[in-house]
Amino acid sequence: MAKKQKHTEQFQNFNIVVFGGTGDLALRKIYPALYHRYIDGQLNCKYNIIAITRKTDQEQTFRSQVRLFLEKNLESSKTNKSEIEAFMTNIHLTVAKEPSVEGYKSLKTFLNKHKDFQNIYYFSTPSSAFGPISKALKASDLAGKNSKVVLEKPLGHSLESSISINDEITQTFEESQIYRIDHYLGKETVQNLMVLRFANNLFERAWDAEHIDSIQITVAESLGVEKRAGYYDQSGALLDMVQNHLLQLVCLVAMEPPFALNANEVRNEKLKILRSLRPFTKDSIRTESIKGQYTRGNIEGSKVSSYLEDIEKYESKTETFVALKTFVDNWRWKNVPFYLRTGKRMKKRYSEIVINFKQVKHNIFPSKEKINNNKLIIRLQPEERIELIQMTKIPGPGGYRYKPTALKLDYMDTFEERFPEAYERLIIDVIRGNQTLFMSQDELVAAWTWIETITNSWKNTNSKNVLYAAGTWGPGDEILNNDESWVTKTWKNK
Ligand code: BG6
């Protein structure tokens, strides 16, 4: 069993009000995250978790569902019936049929019993509801200075809609009260990118166009669209994954060192990267992007259906795969391609960043055998680890023979600590009031602005999906032509 950490930081008492409180995200992620923090001893203050539902008569089903998720989804060593029951006493279900003063009456009565607590409103609903909920909270006098709001993605479906949602929310909450979640930023391995880059002199010195040939970011999933067909078919891989998660990874890999680790500095550096992304045009979209859609296939021995069958909509043109070659047009990254790929129903779940260094300038060895590039491979999930691929002499006679070998740091073997789920870190940061790992509105606008150069160019060129069989690595190689660096061992041979 993992060691309990000592927590000395004292939090202000809080109410966390979860809109969409009986939904999948709340059950799978939010309550288990809070439970983990509770058994770890970090919730050392008074708190209430208030799940908001629109339906009546949900109490019993809801409580047994929460219990089920706490029991099933957590490591067995951590589940203890009496601890679960103690935690459950803090969870309350409240019915609010509509976002209005009338609808929030019982919520208000509850919150008013804890007037000195901070109120955290967690919007785990479609973003079209964010405006009306905020408005009703304000009208109910529940959105004072001591309150915060957490927003789940997707924040709109275009630049315009995301701005208009933001405009509605900011009539109630100030930017300093708004926490836009991108759960990738809460992942341990993603946070480690900051440490890897800014606590190691070695890498930072070689972190630029002079030393780096290309960067690849891959987020492959073997899952399909599960029960989210309605949402996913409106979004597709570009909006569901690239607009947020992959772009945040690009930011962390490419940004300048902030002068200190605080929200303003970090977000400003990320913003500069988003603004430096080279816009796609009618020309570049043809050669530097690919979108795809999965057909029937086989994943780990099981047959799986096609996307169209999964969503039961046979004319859908939504992409379930996207690969892009892009550039960060600034001094540090001049002409270094950033290859981004993500897709559903791929061979395996597998996320990785590969920093592909340049070759040595001159080969002194008599055999003139190829000297491979050094690569720094950052495996985000699963089997989290870092590998540095370097050339090594093959021992024995026969002159200088060499081959690439890996220096490995395996997270699981190196650290005894359990890996907290992304939501644990993020929710705790909301409670403590640290916005560093949350997106600012400016970042969101910059991300949407660039994404729209892709959606518009796809539209203008009438780009079509390339079909790929489920259980393969998708069609990404095509855009690379002869660019060898795209086809790394890591991507092809897994
Ligand atoms: C979500 C997307 O944001 O991230 C999902 O909406 C995707 O479609 C998920 O499956 C991937 O998250 P993770 O943590 O499993 O990599």
Image (cartoon, rainbow, N blue to C red):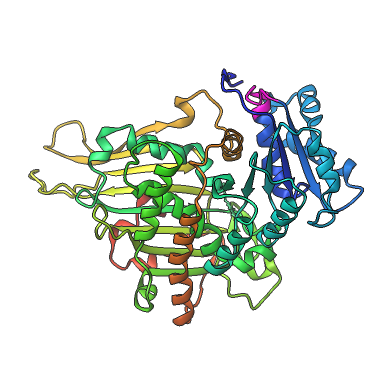
Q: Which residue is depicted at the point 50% across and 50% down? A: 439
Q: Main secondary structure of the magenta part?
A: loop
Residue at the extreme right of the image, as rendered: 57
Closest to the observer: 290 or 332?
A: 332
Quarter of the image with the N terminus is top right
Residue 410 position, x and y percent, is 43, 32
Closest to the observer: 80 or 140?
A: 140
Relative to 366, residue 4 above or below: above
In the image, which residues are magenta? 37-45
Residue 42 colored in magenta in the image: yes
Q: Which residue is depicted at the point 81% across and 44% down? A: 107
Residue 67 position, x and y percent, is 79, 35
Q: Which residue is depicted at the point 51% across and 55% down? A: 441
Residue 212 as seen in the image, left or right of residue 134: left
Q: Is residue 51 visible?
A: yes
Q: Which residue is depicted at the point 28% across and 63% down? A: 483
Q: Is residue 474 visible?
A: no
Residue 414 position, x and y percent, is 44, 25
Relative to 101, residue 148 above or below: above
Residue 440 colored in magenta in the image: no
Residue 475 position, x and y percent, is 45, 66
Closest to the observer: 114 or 379?
A: 114
Residue 297 as seen in the image, left or right of residue 24: left
Relative to 197, residue 360 above or below: below
Q: How many marks?
A: 0
In the picture, residue 450 is in which quadrant?
bottom left
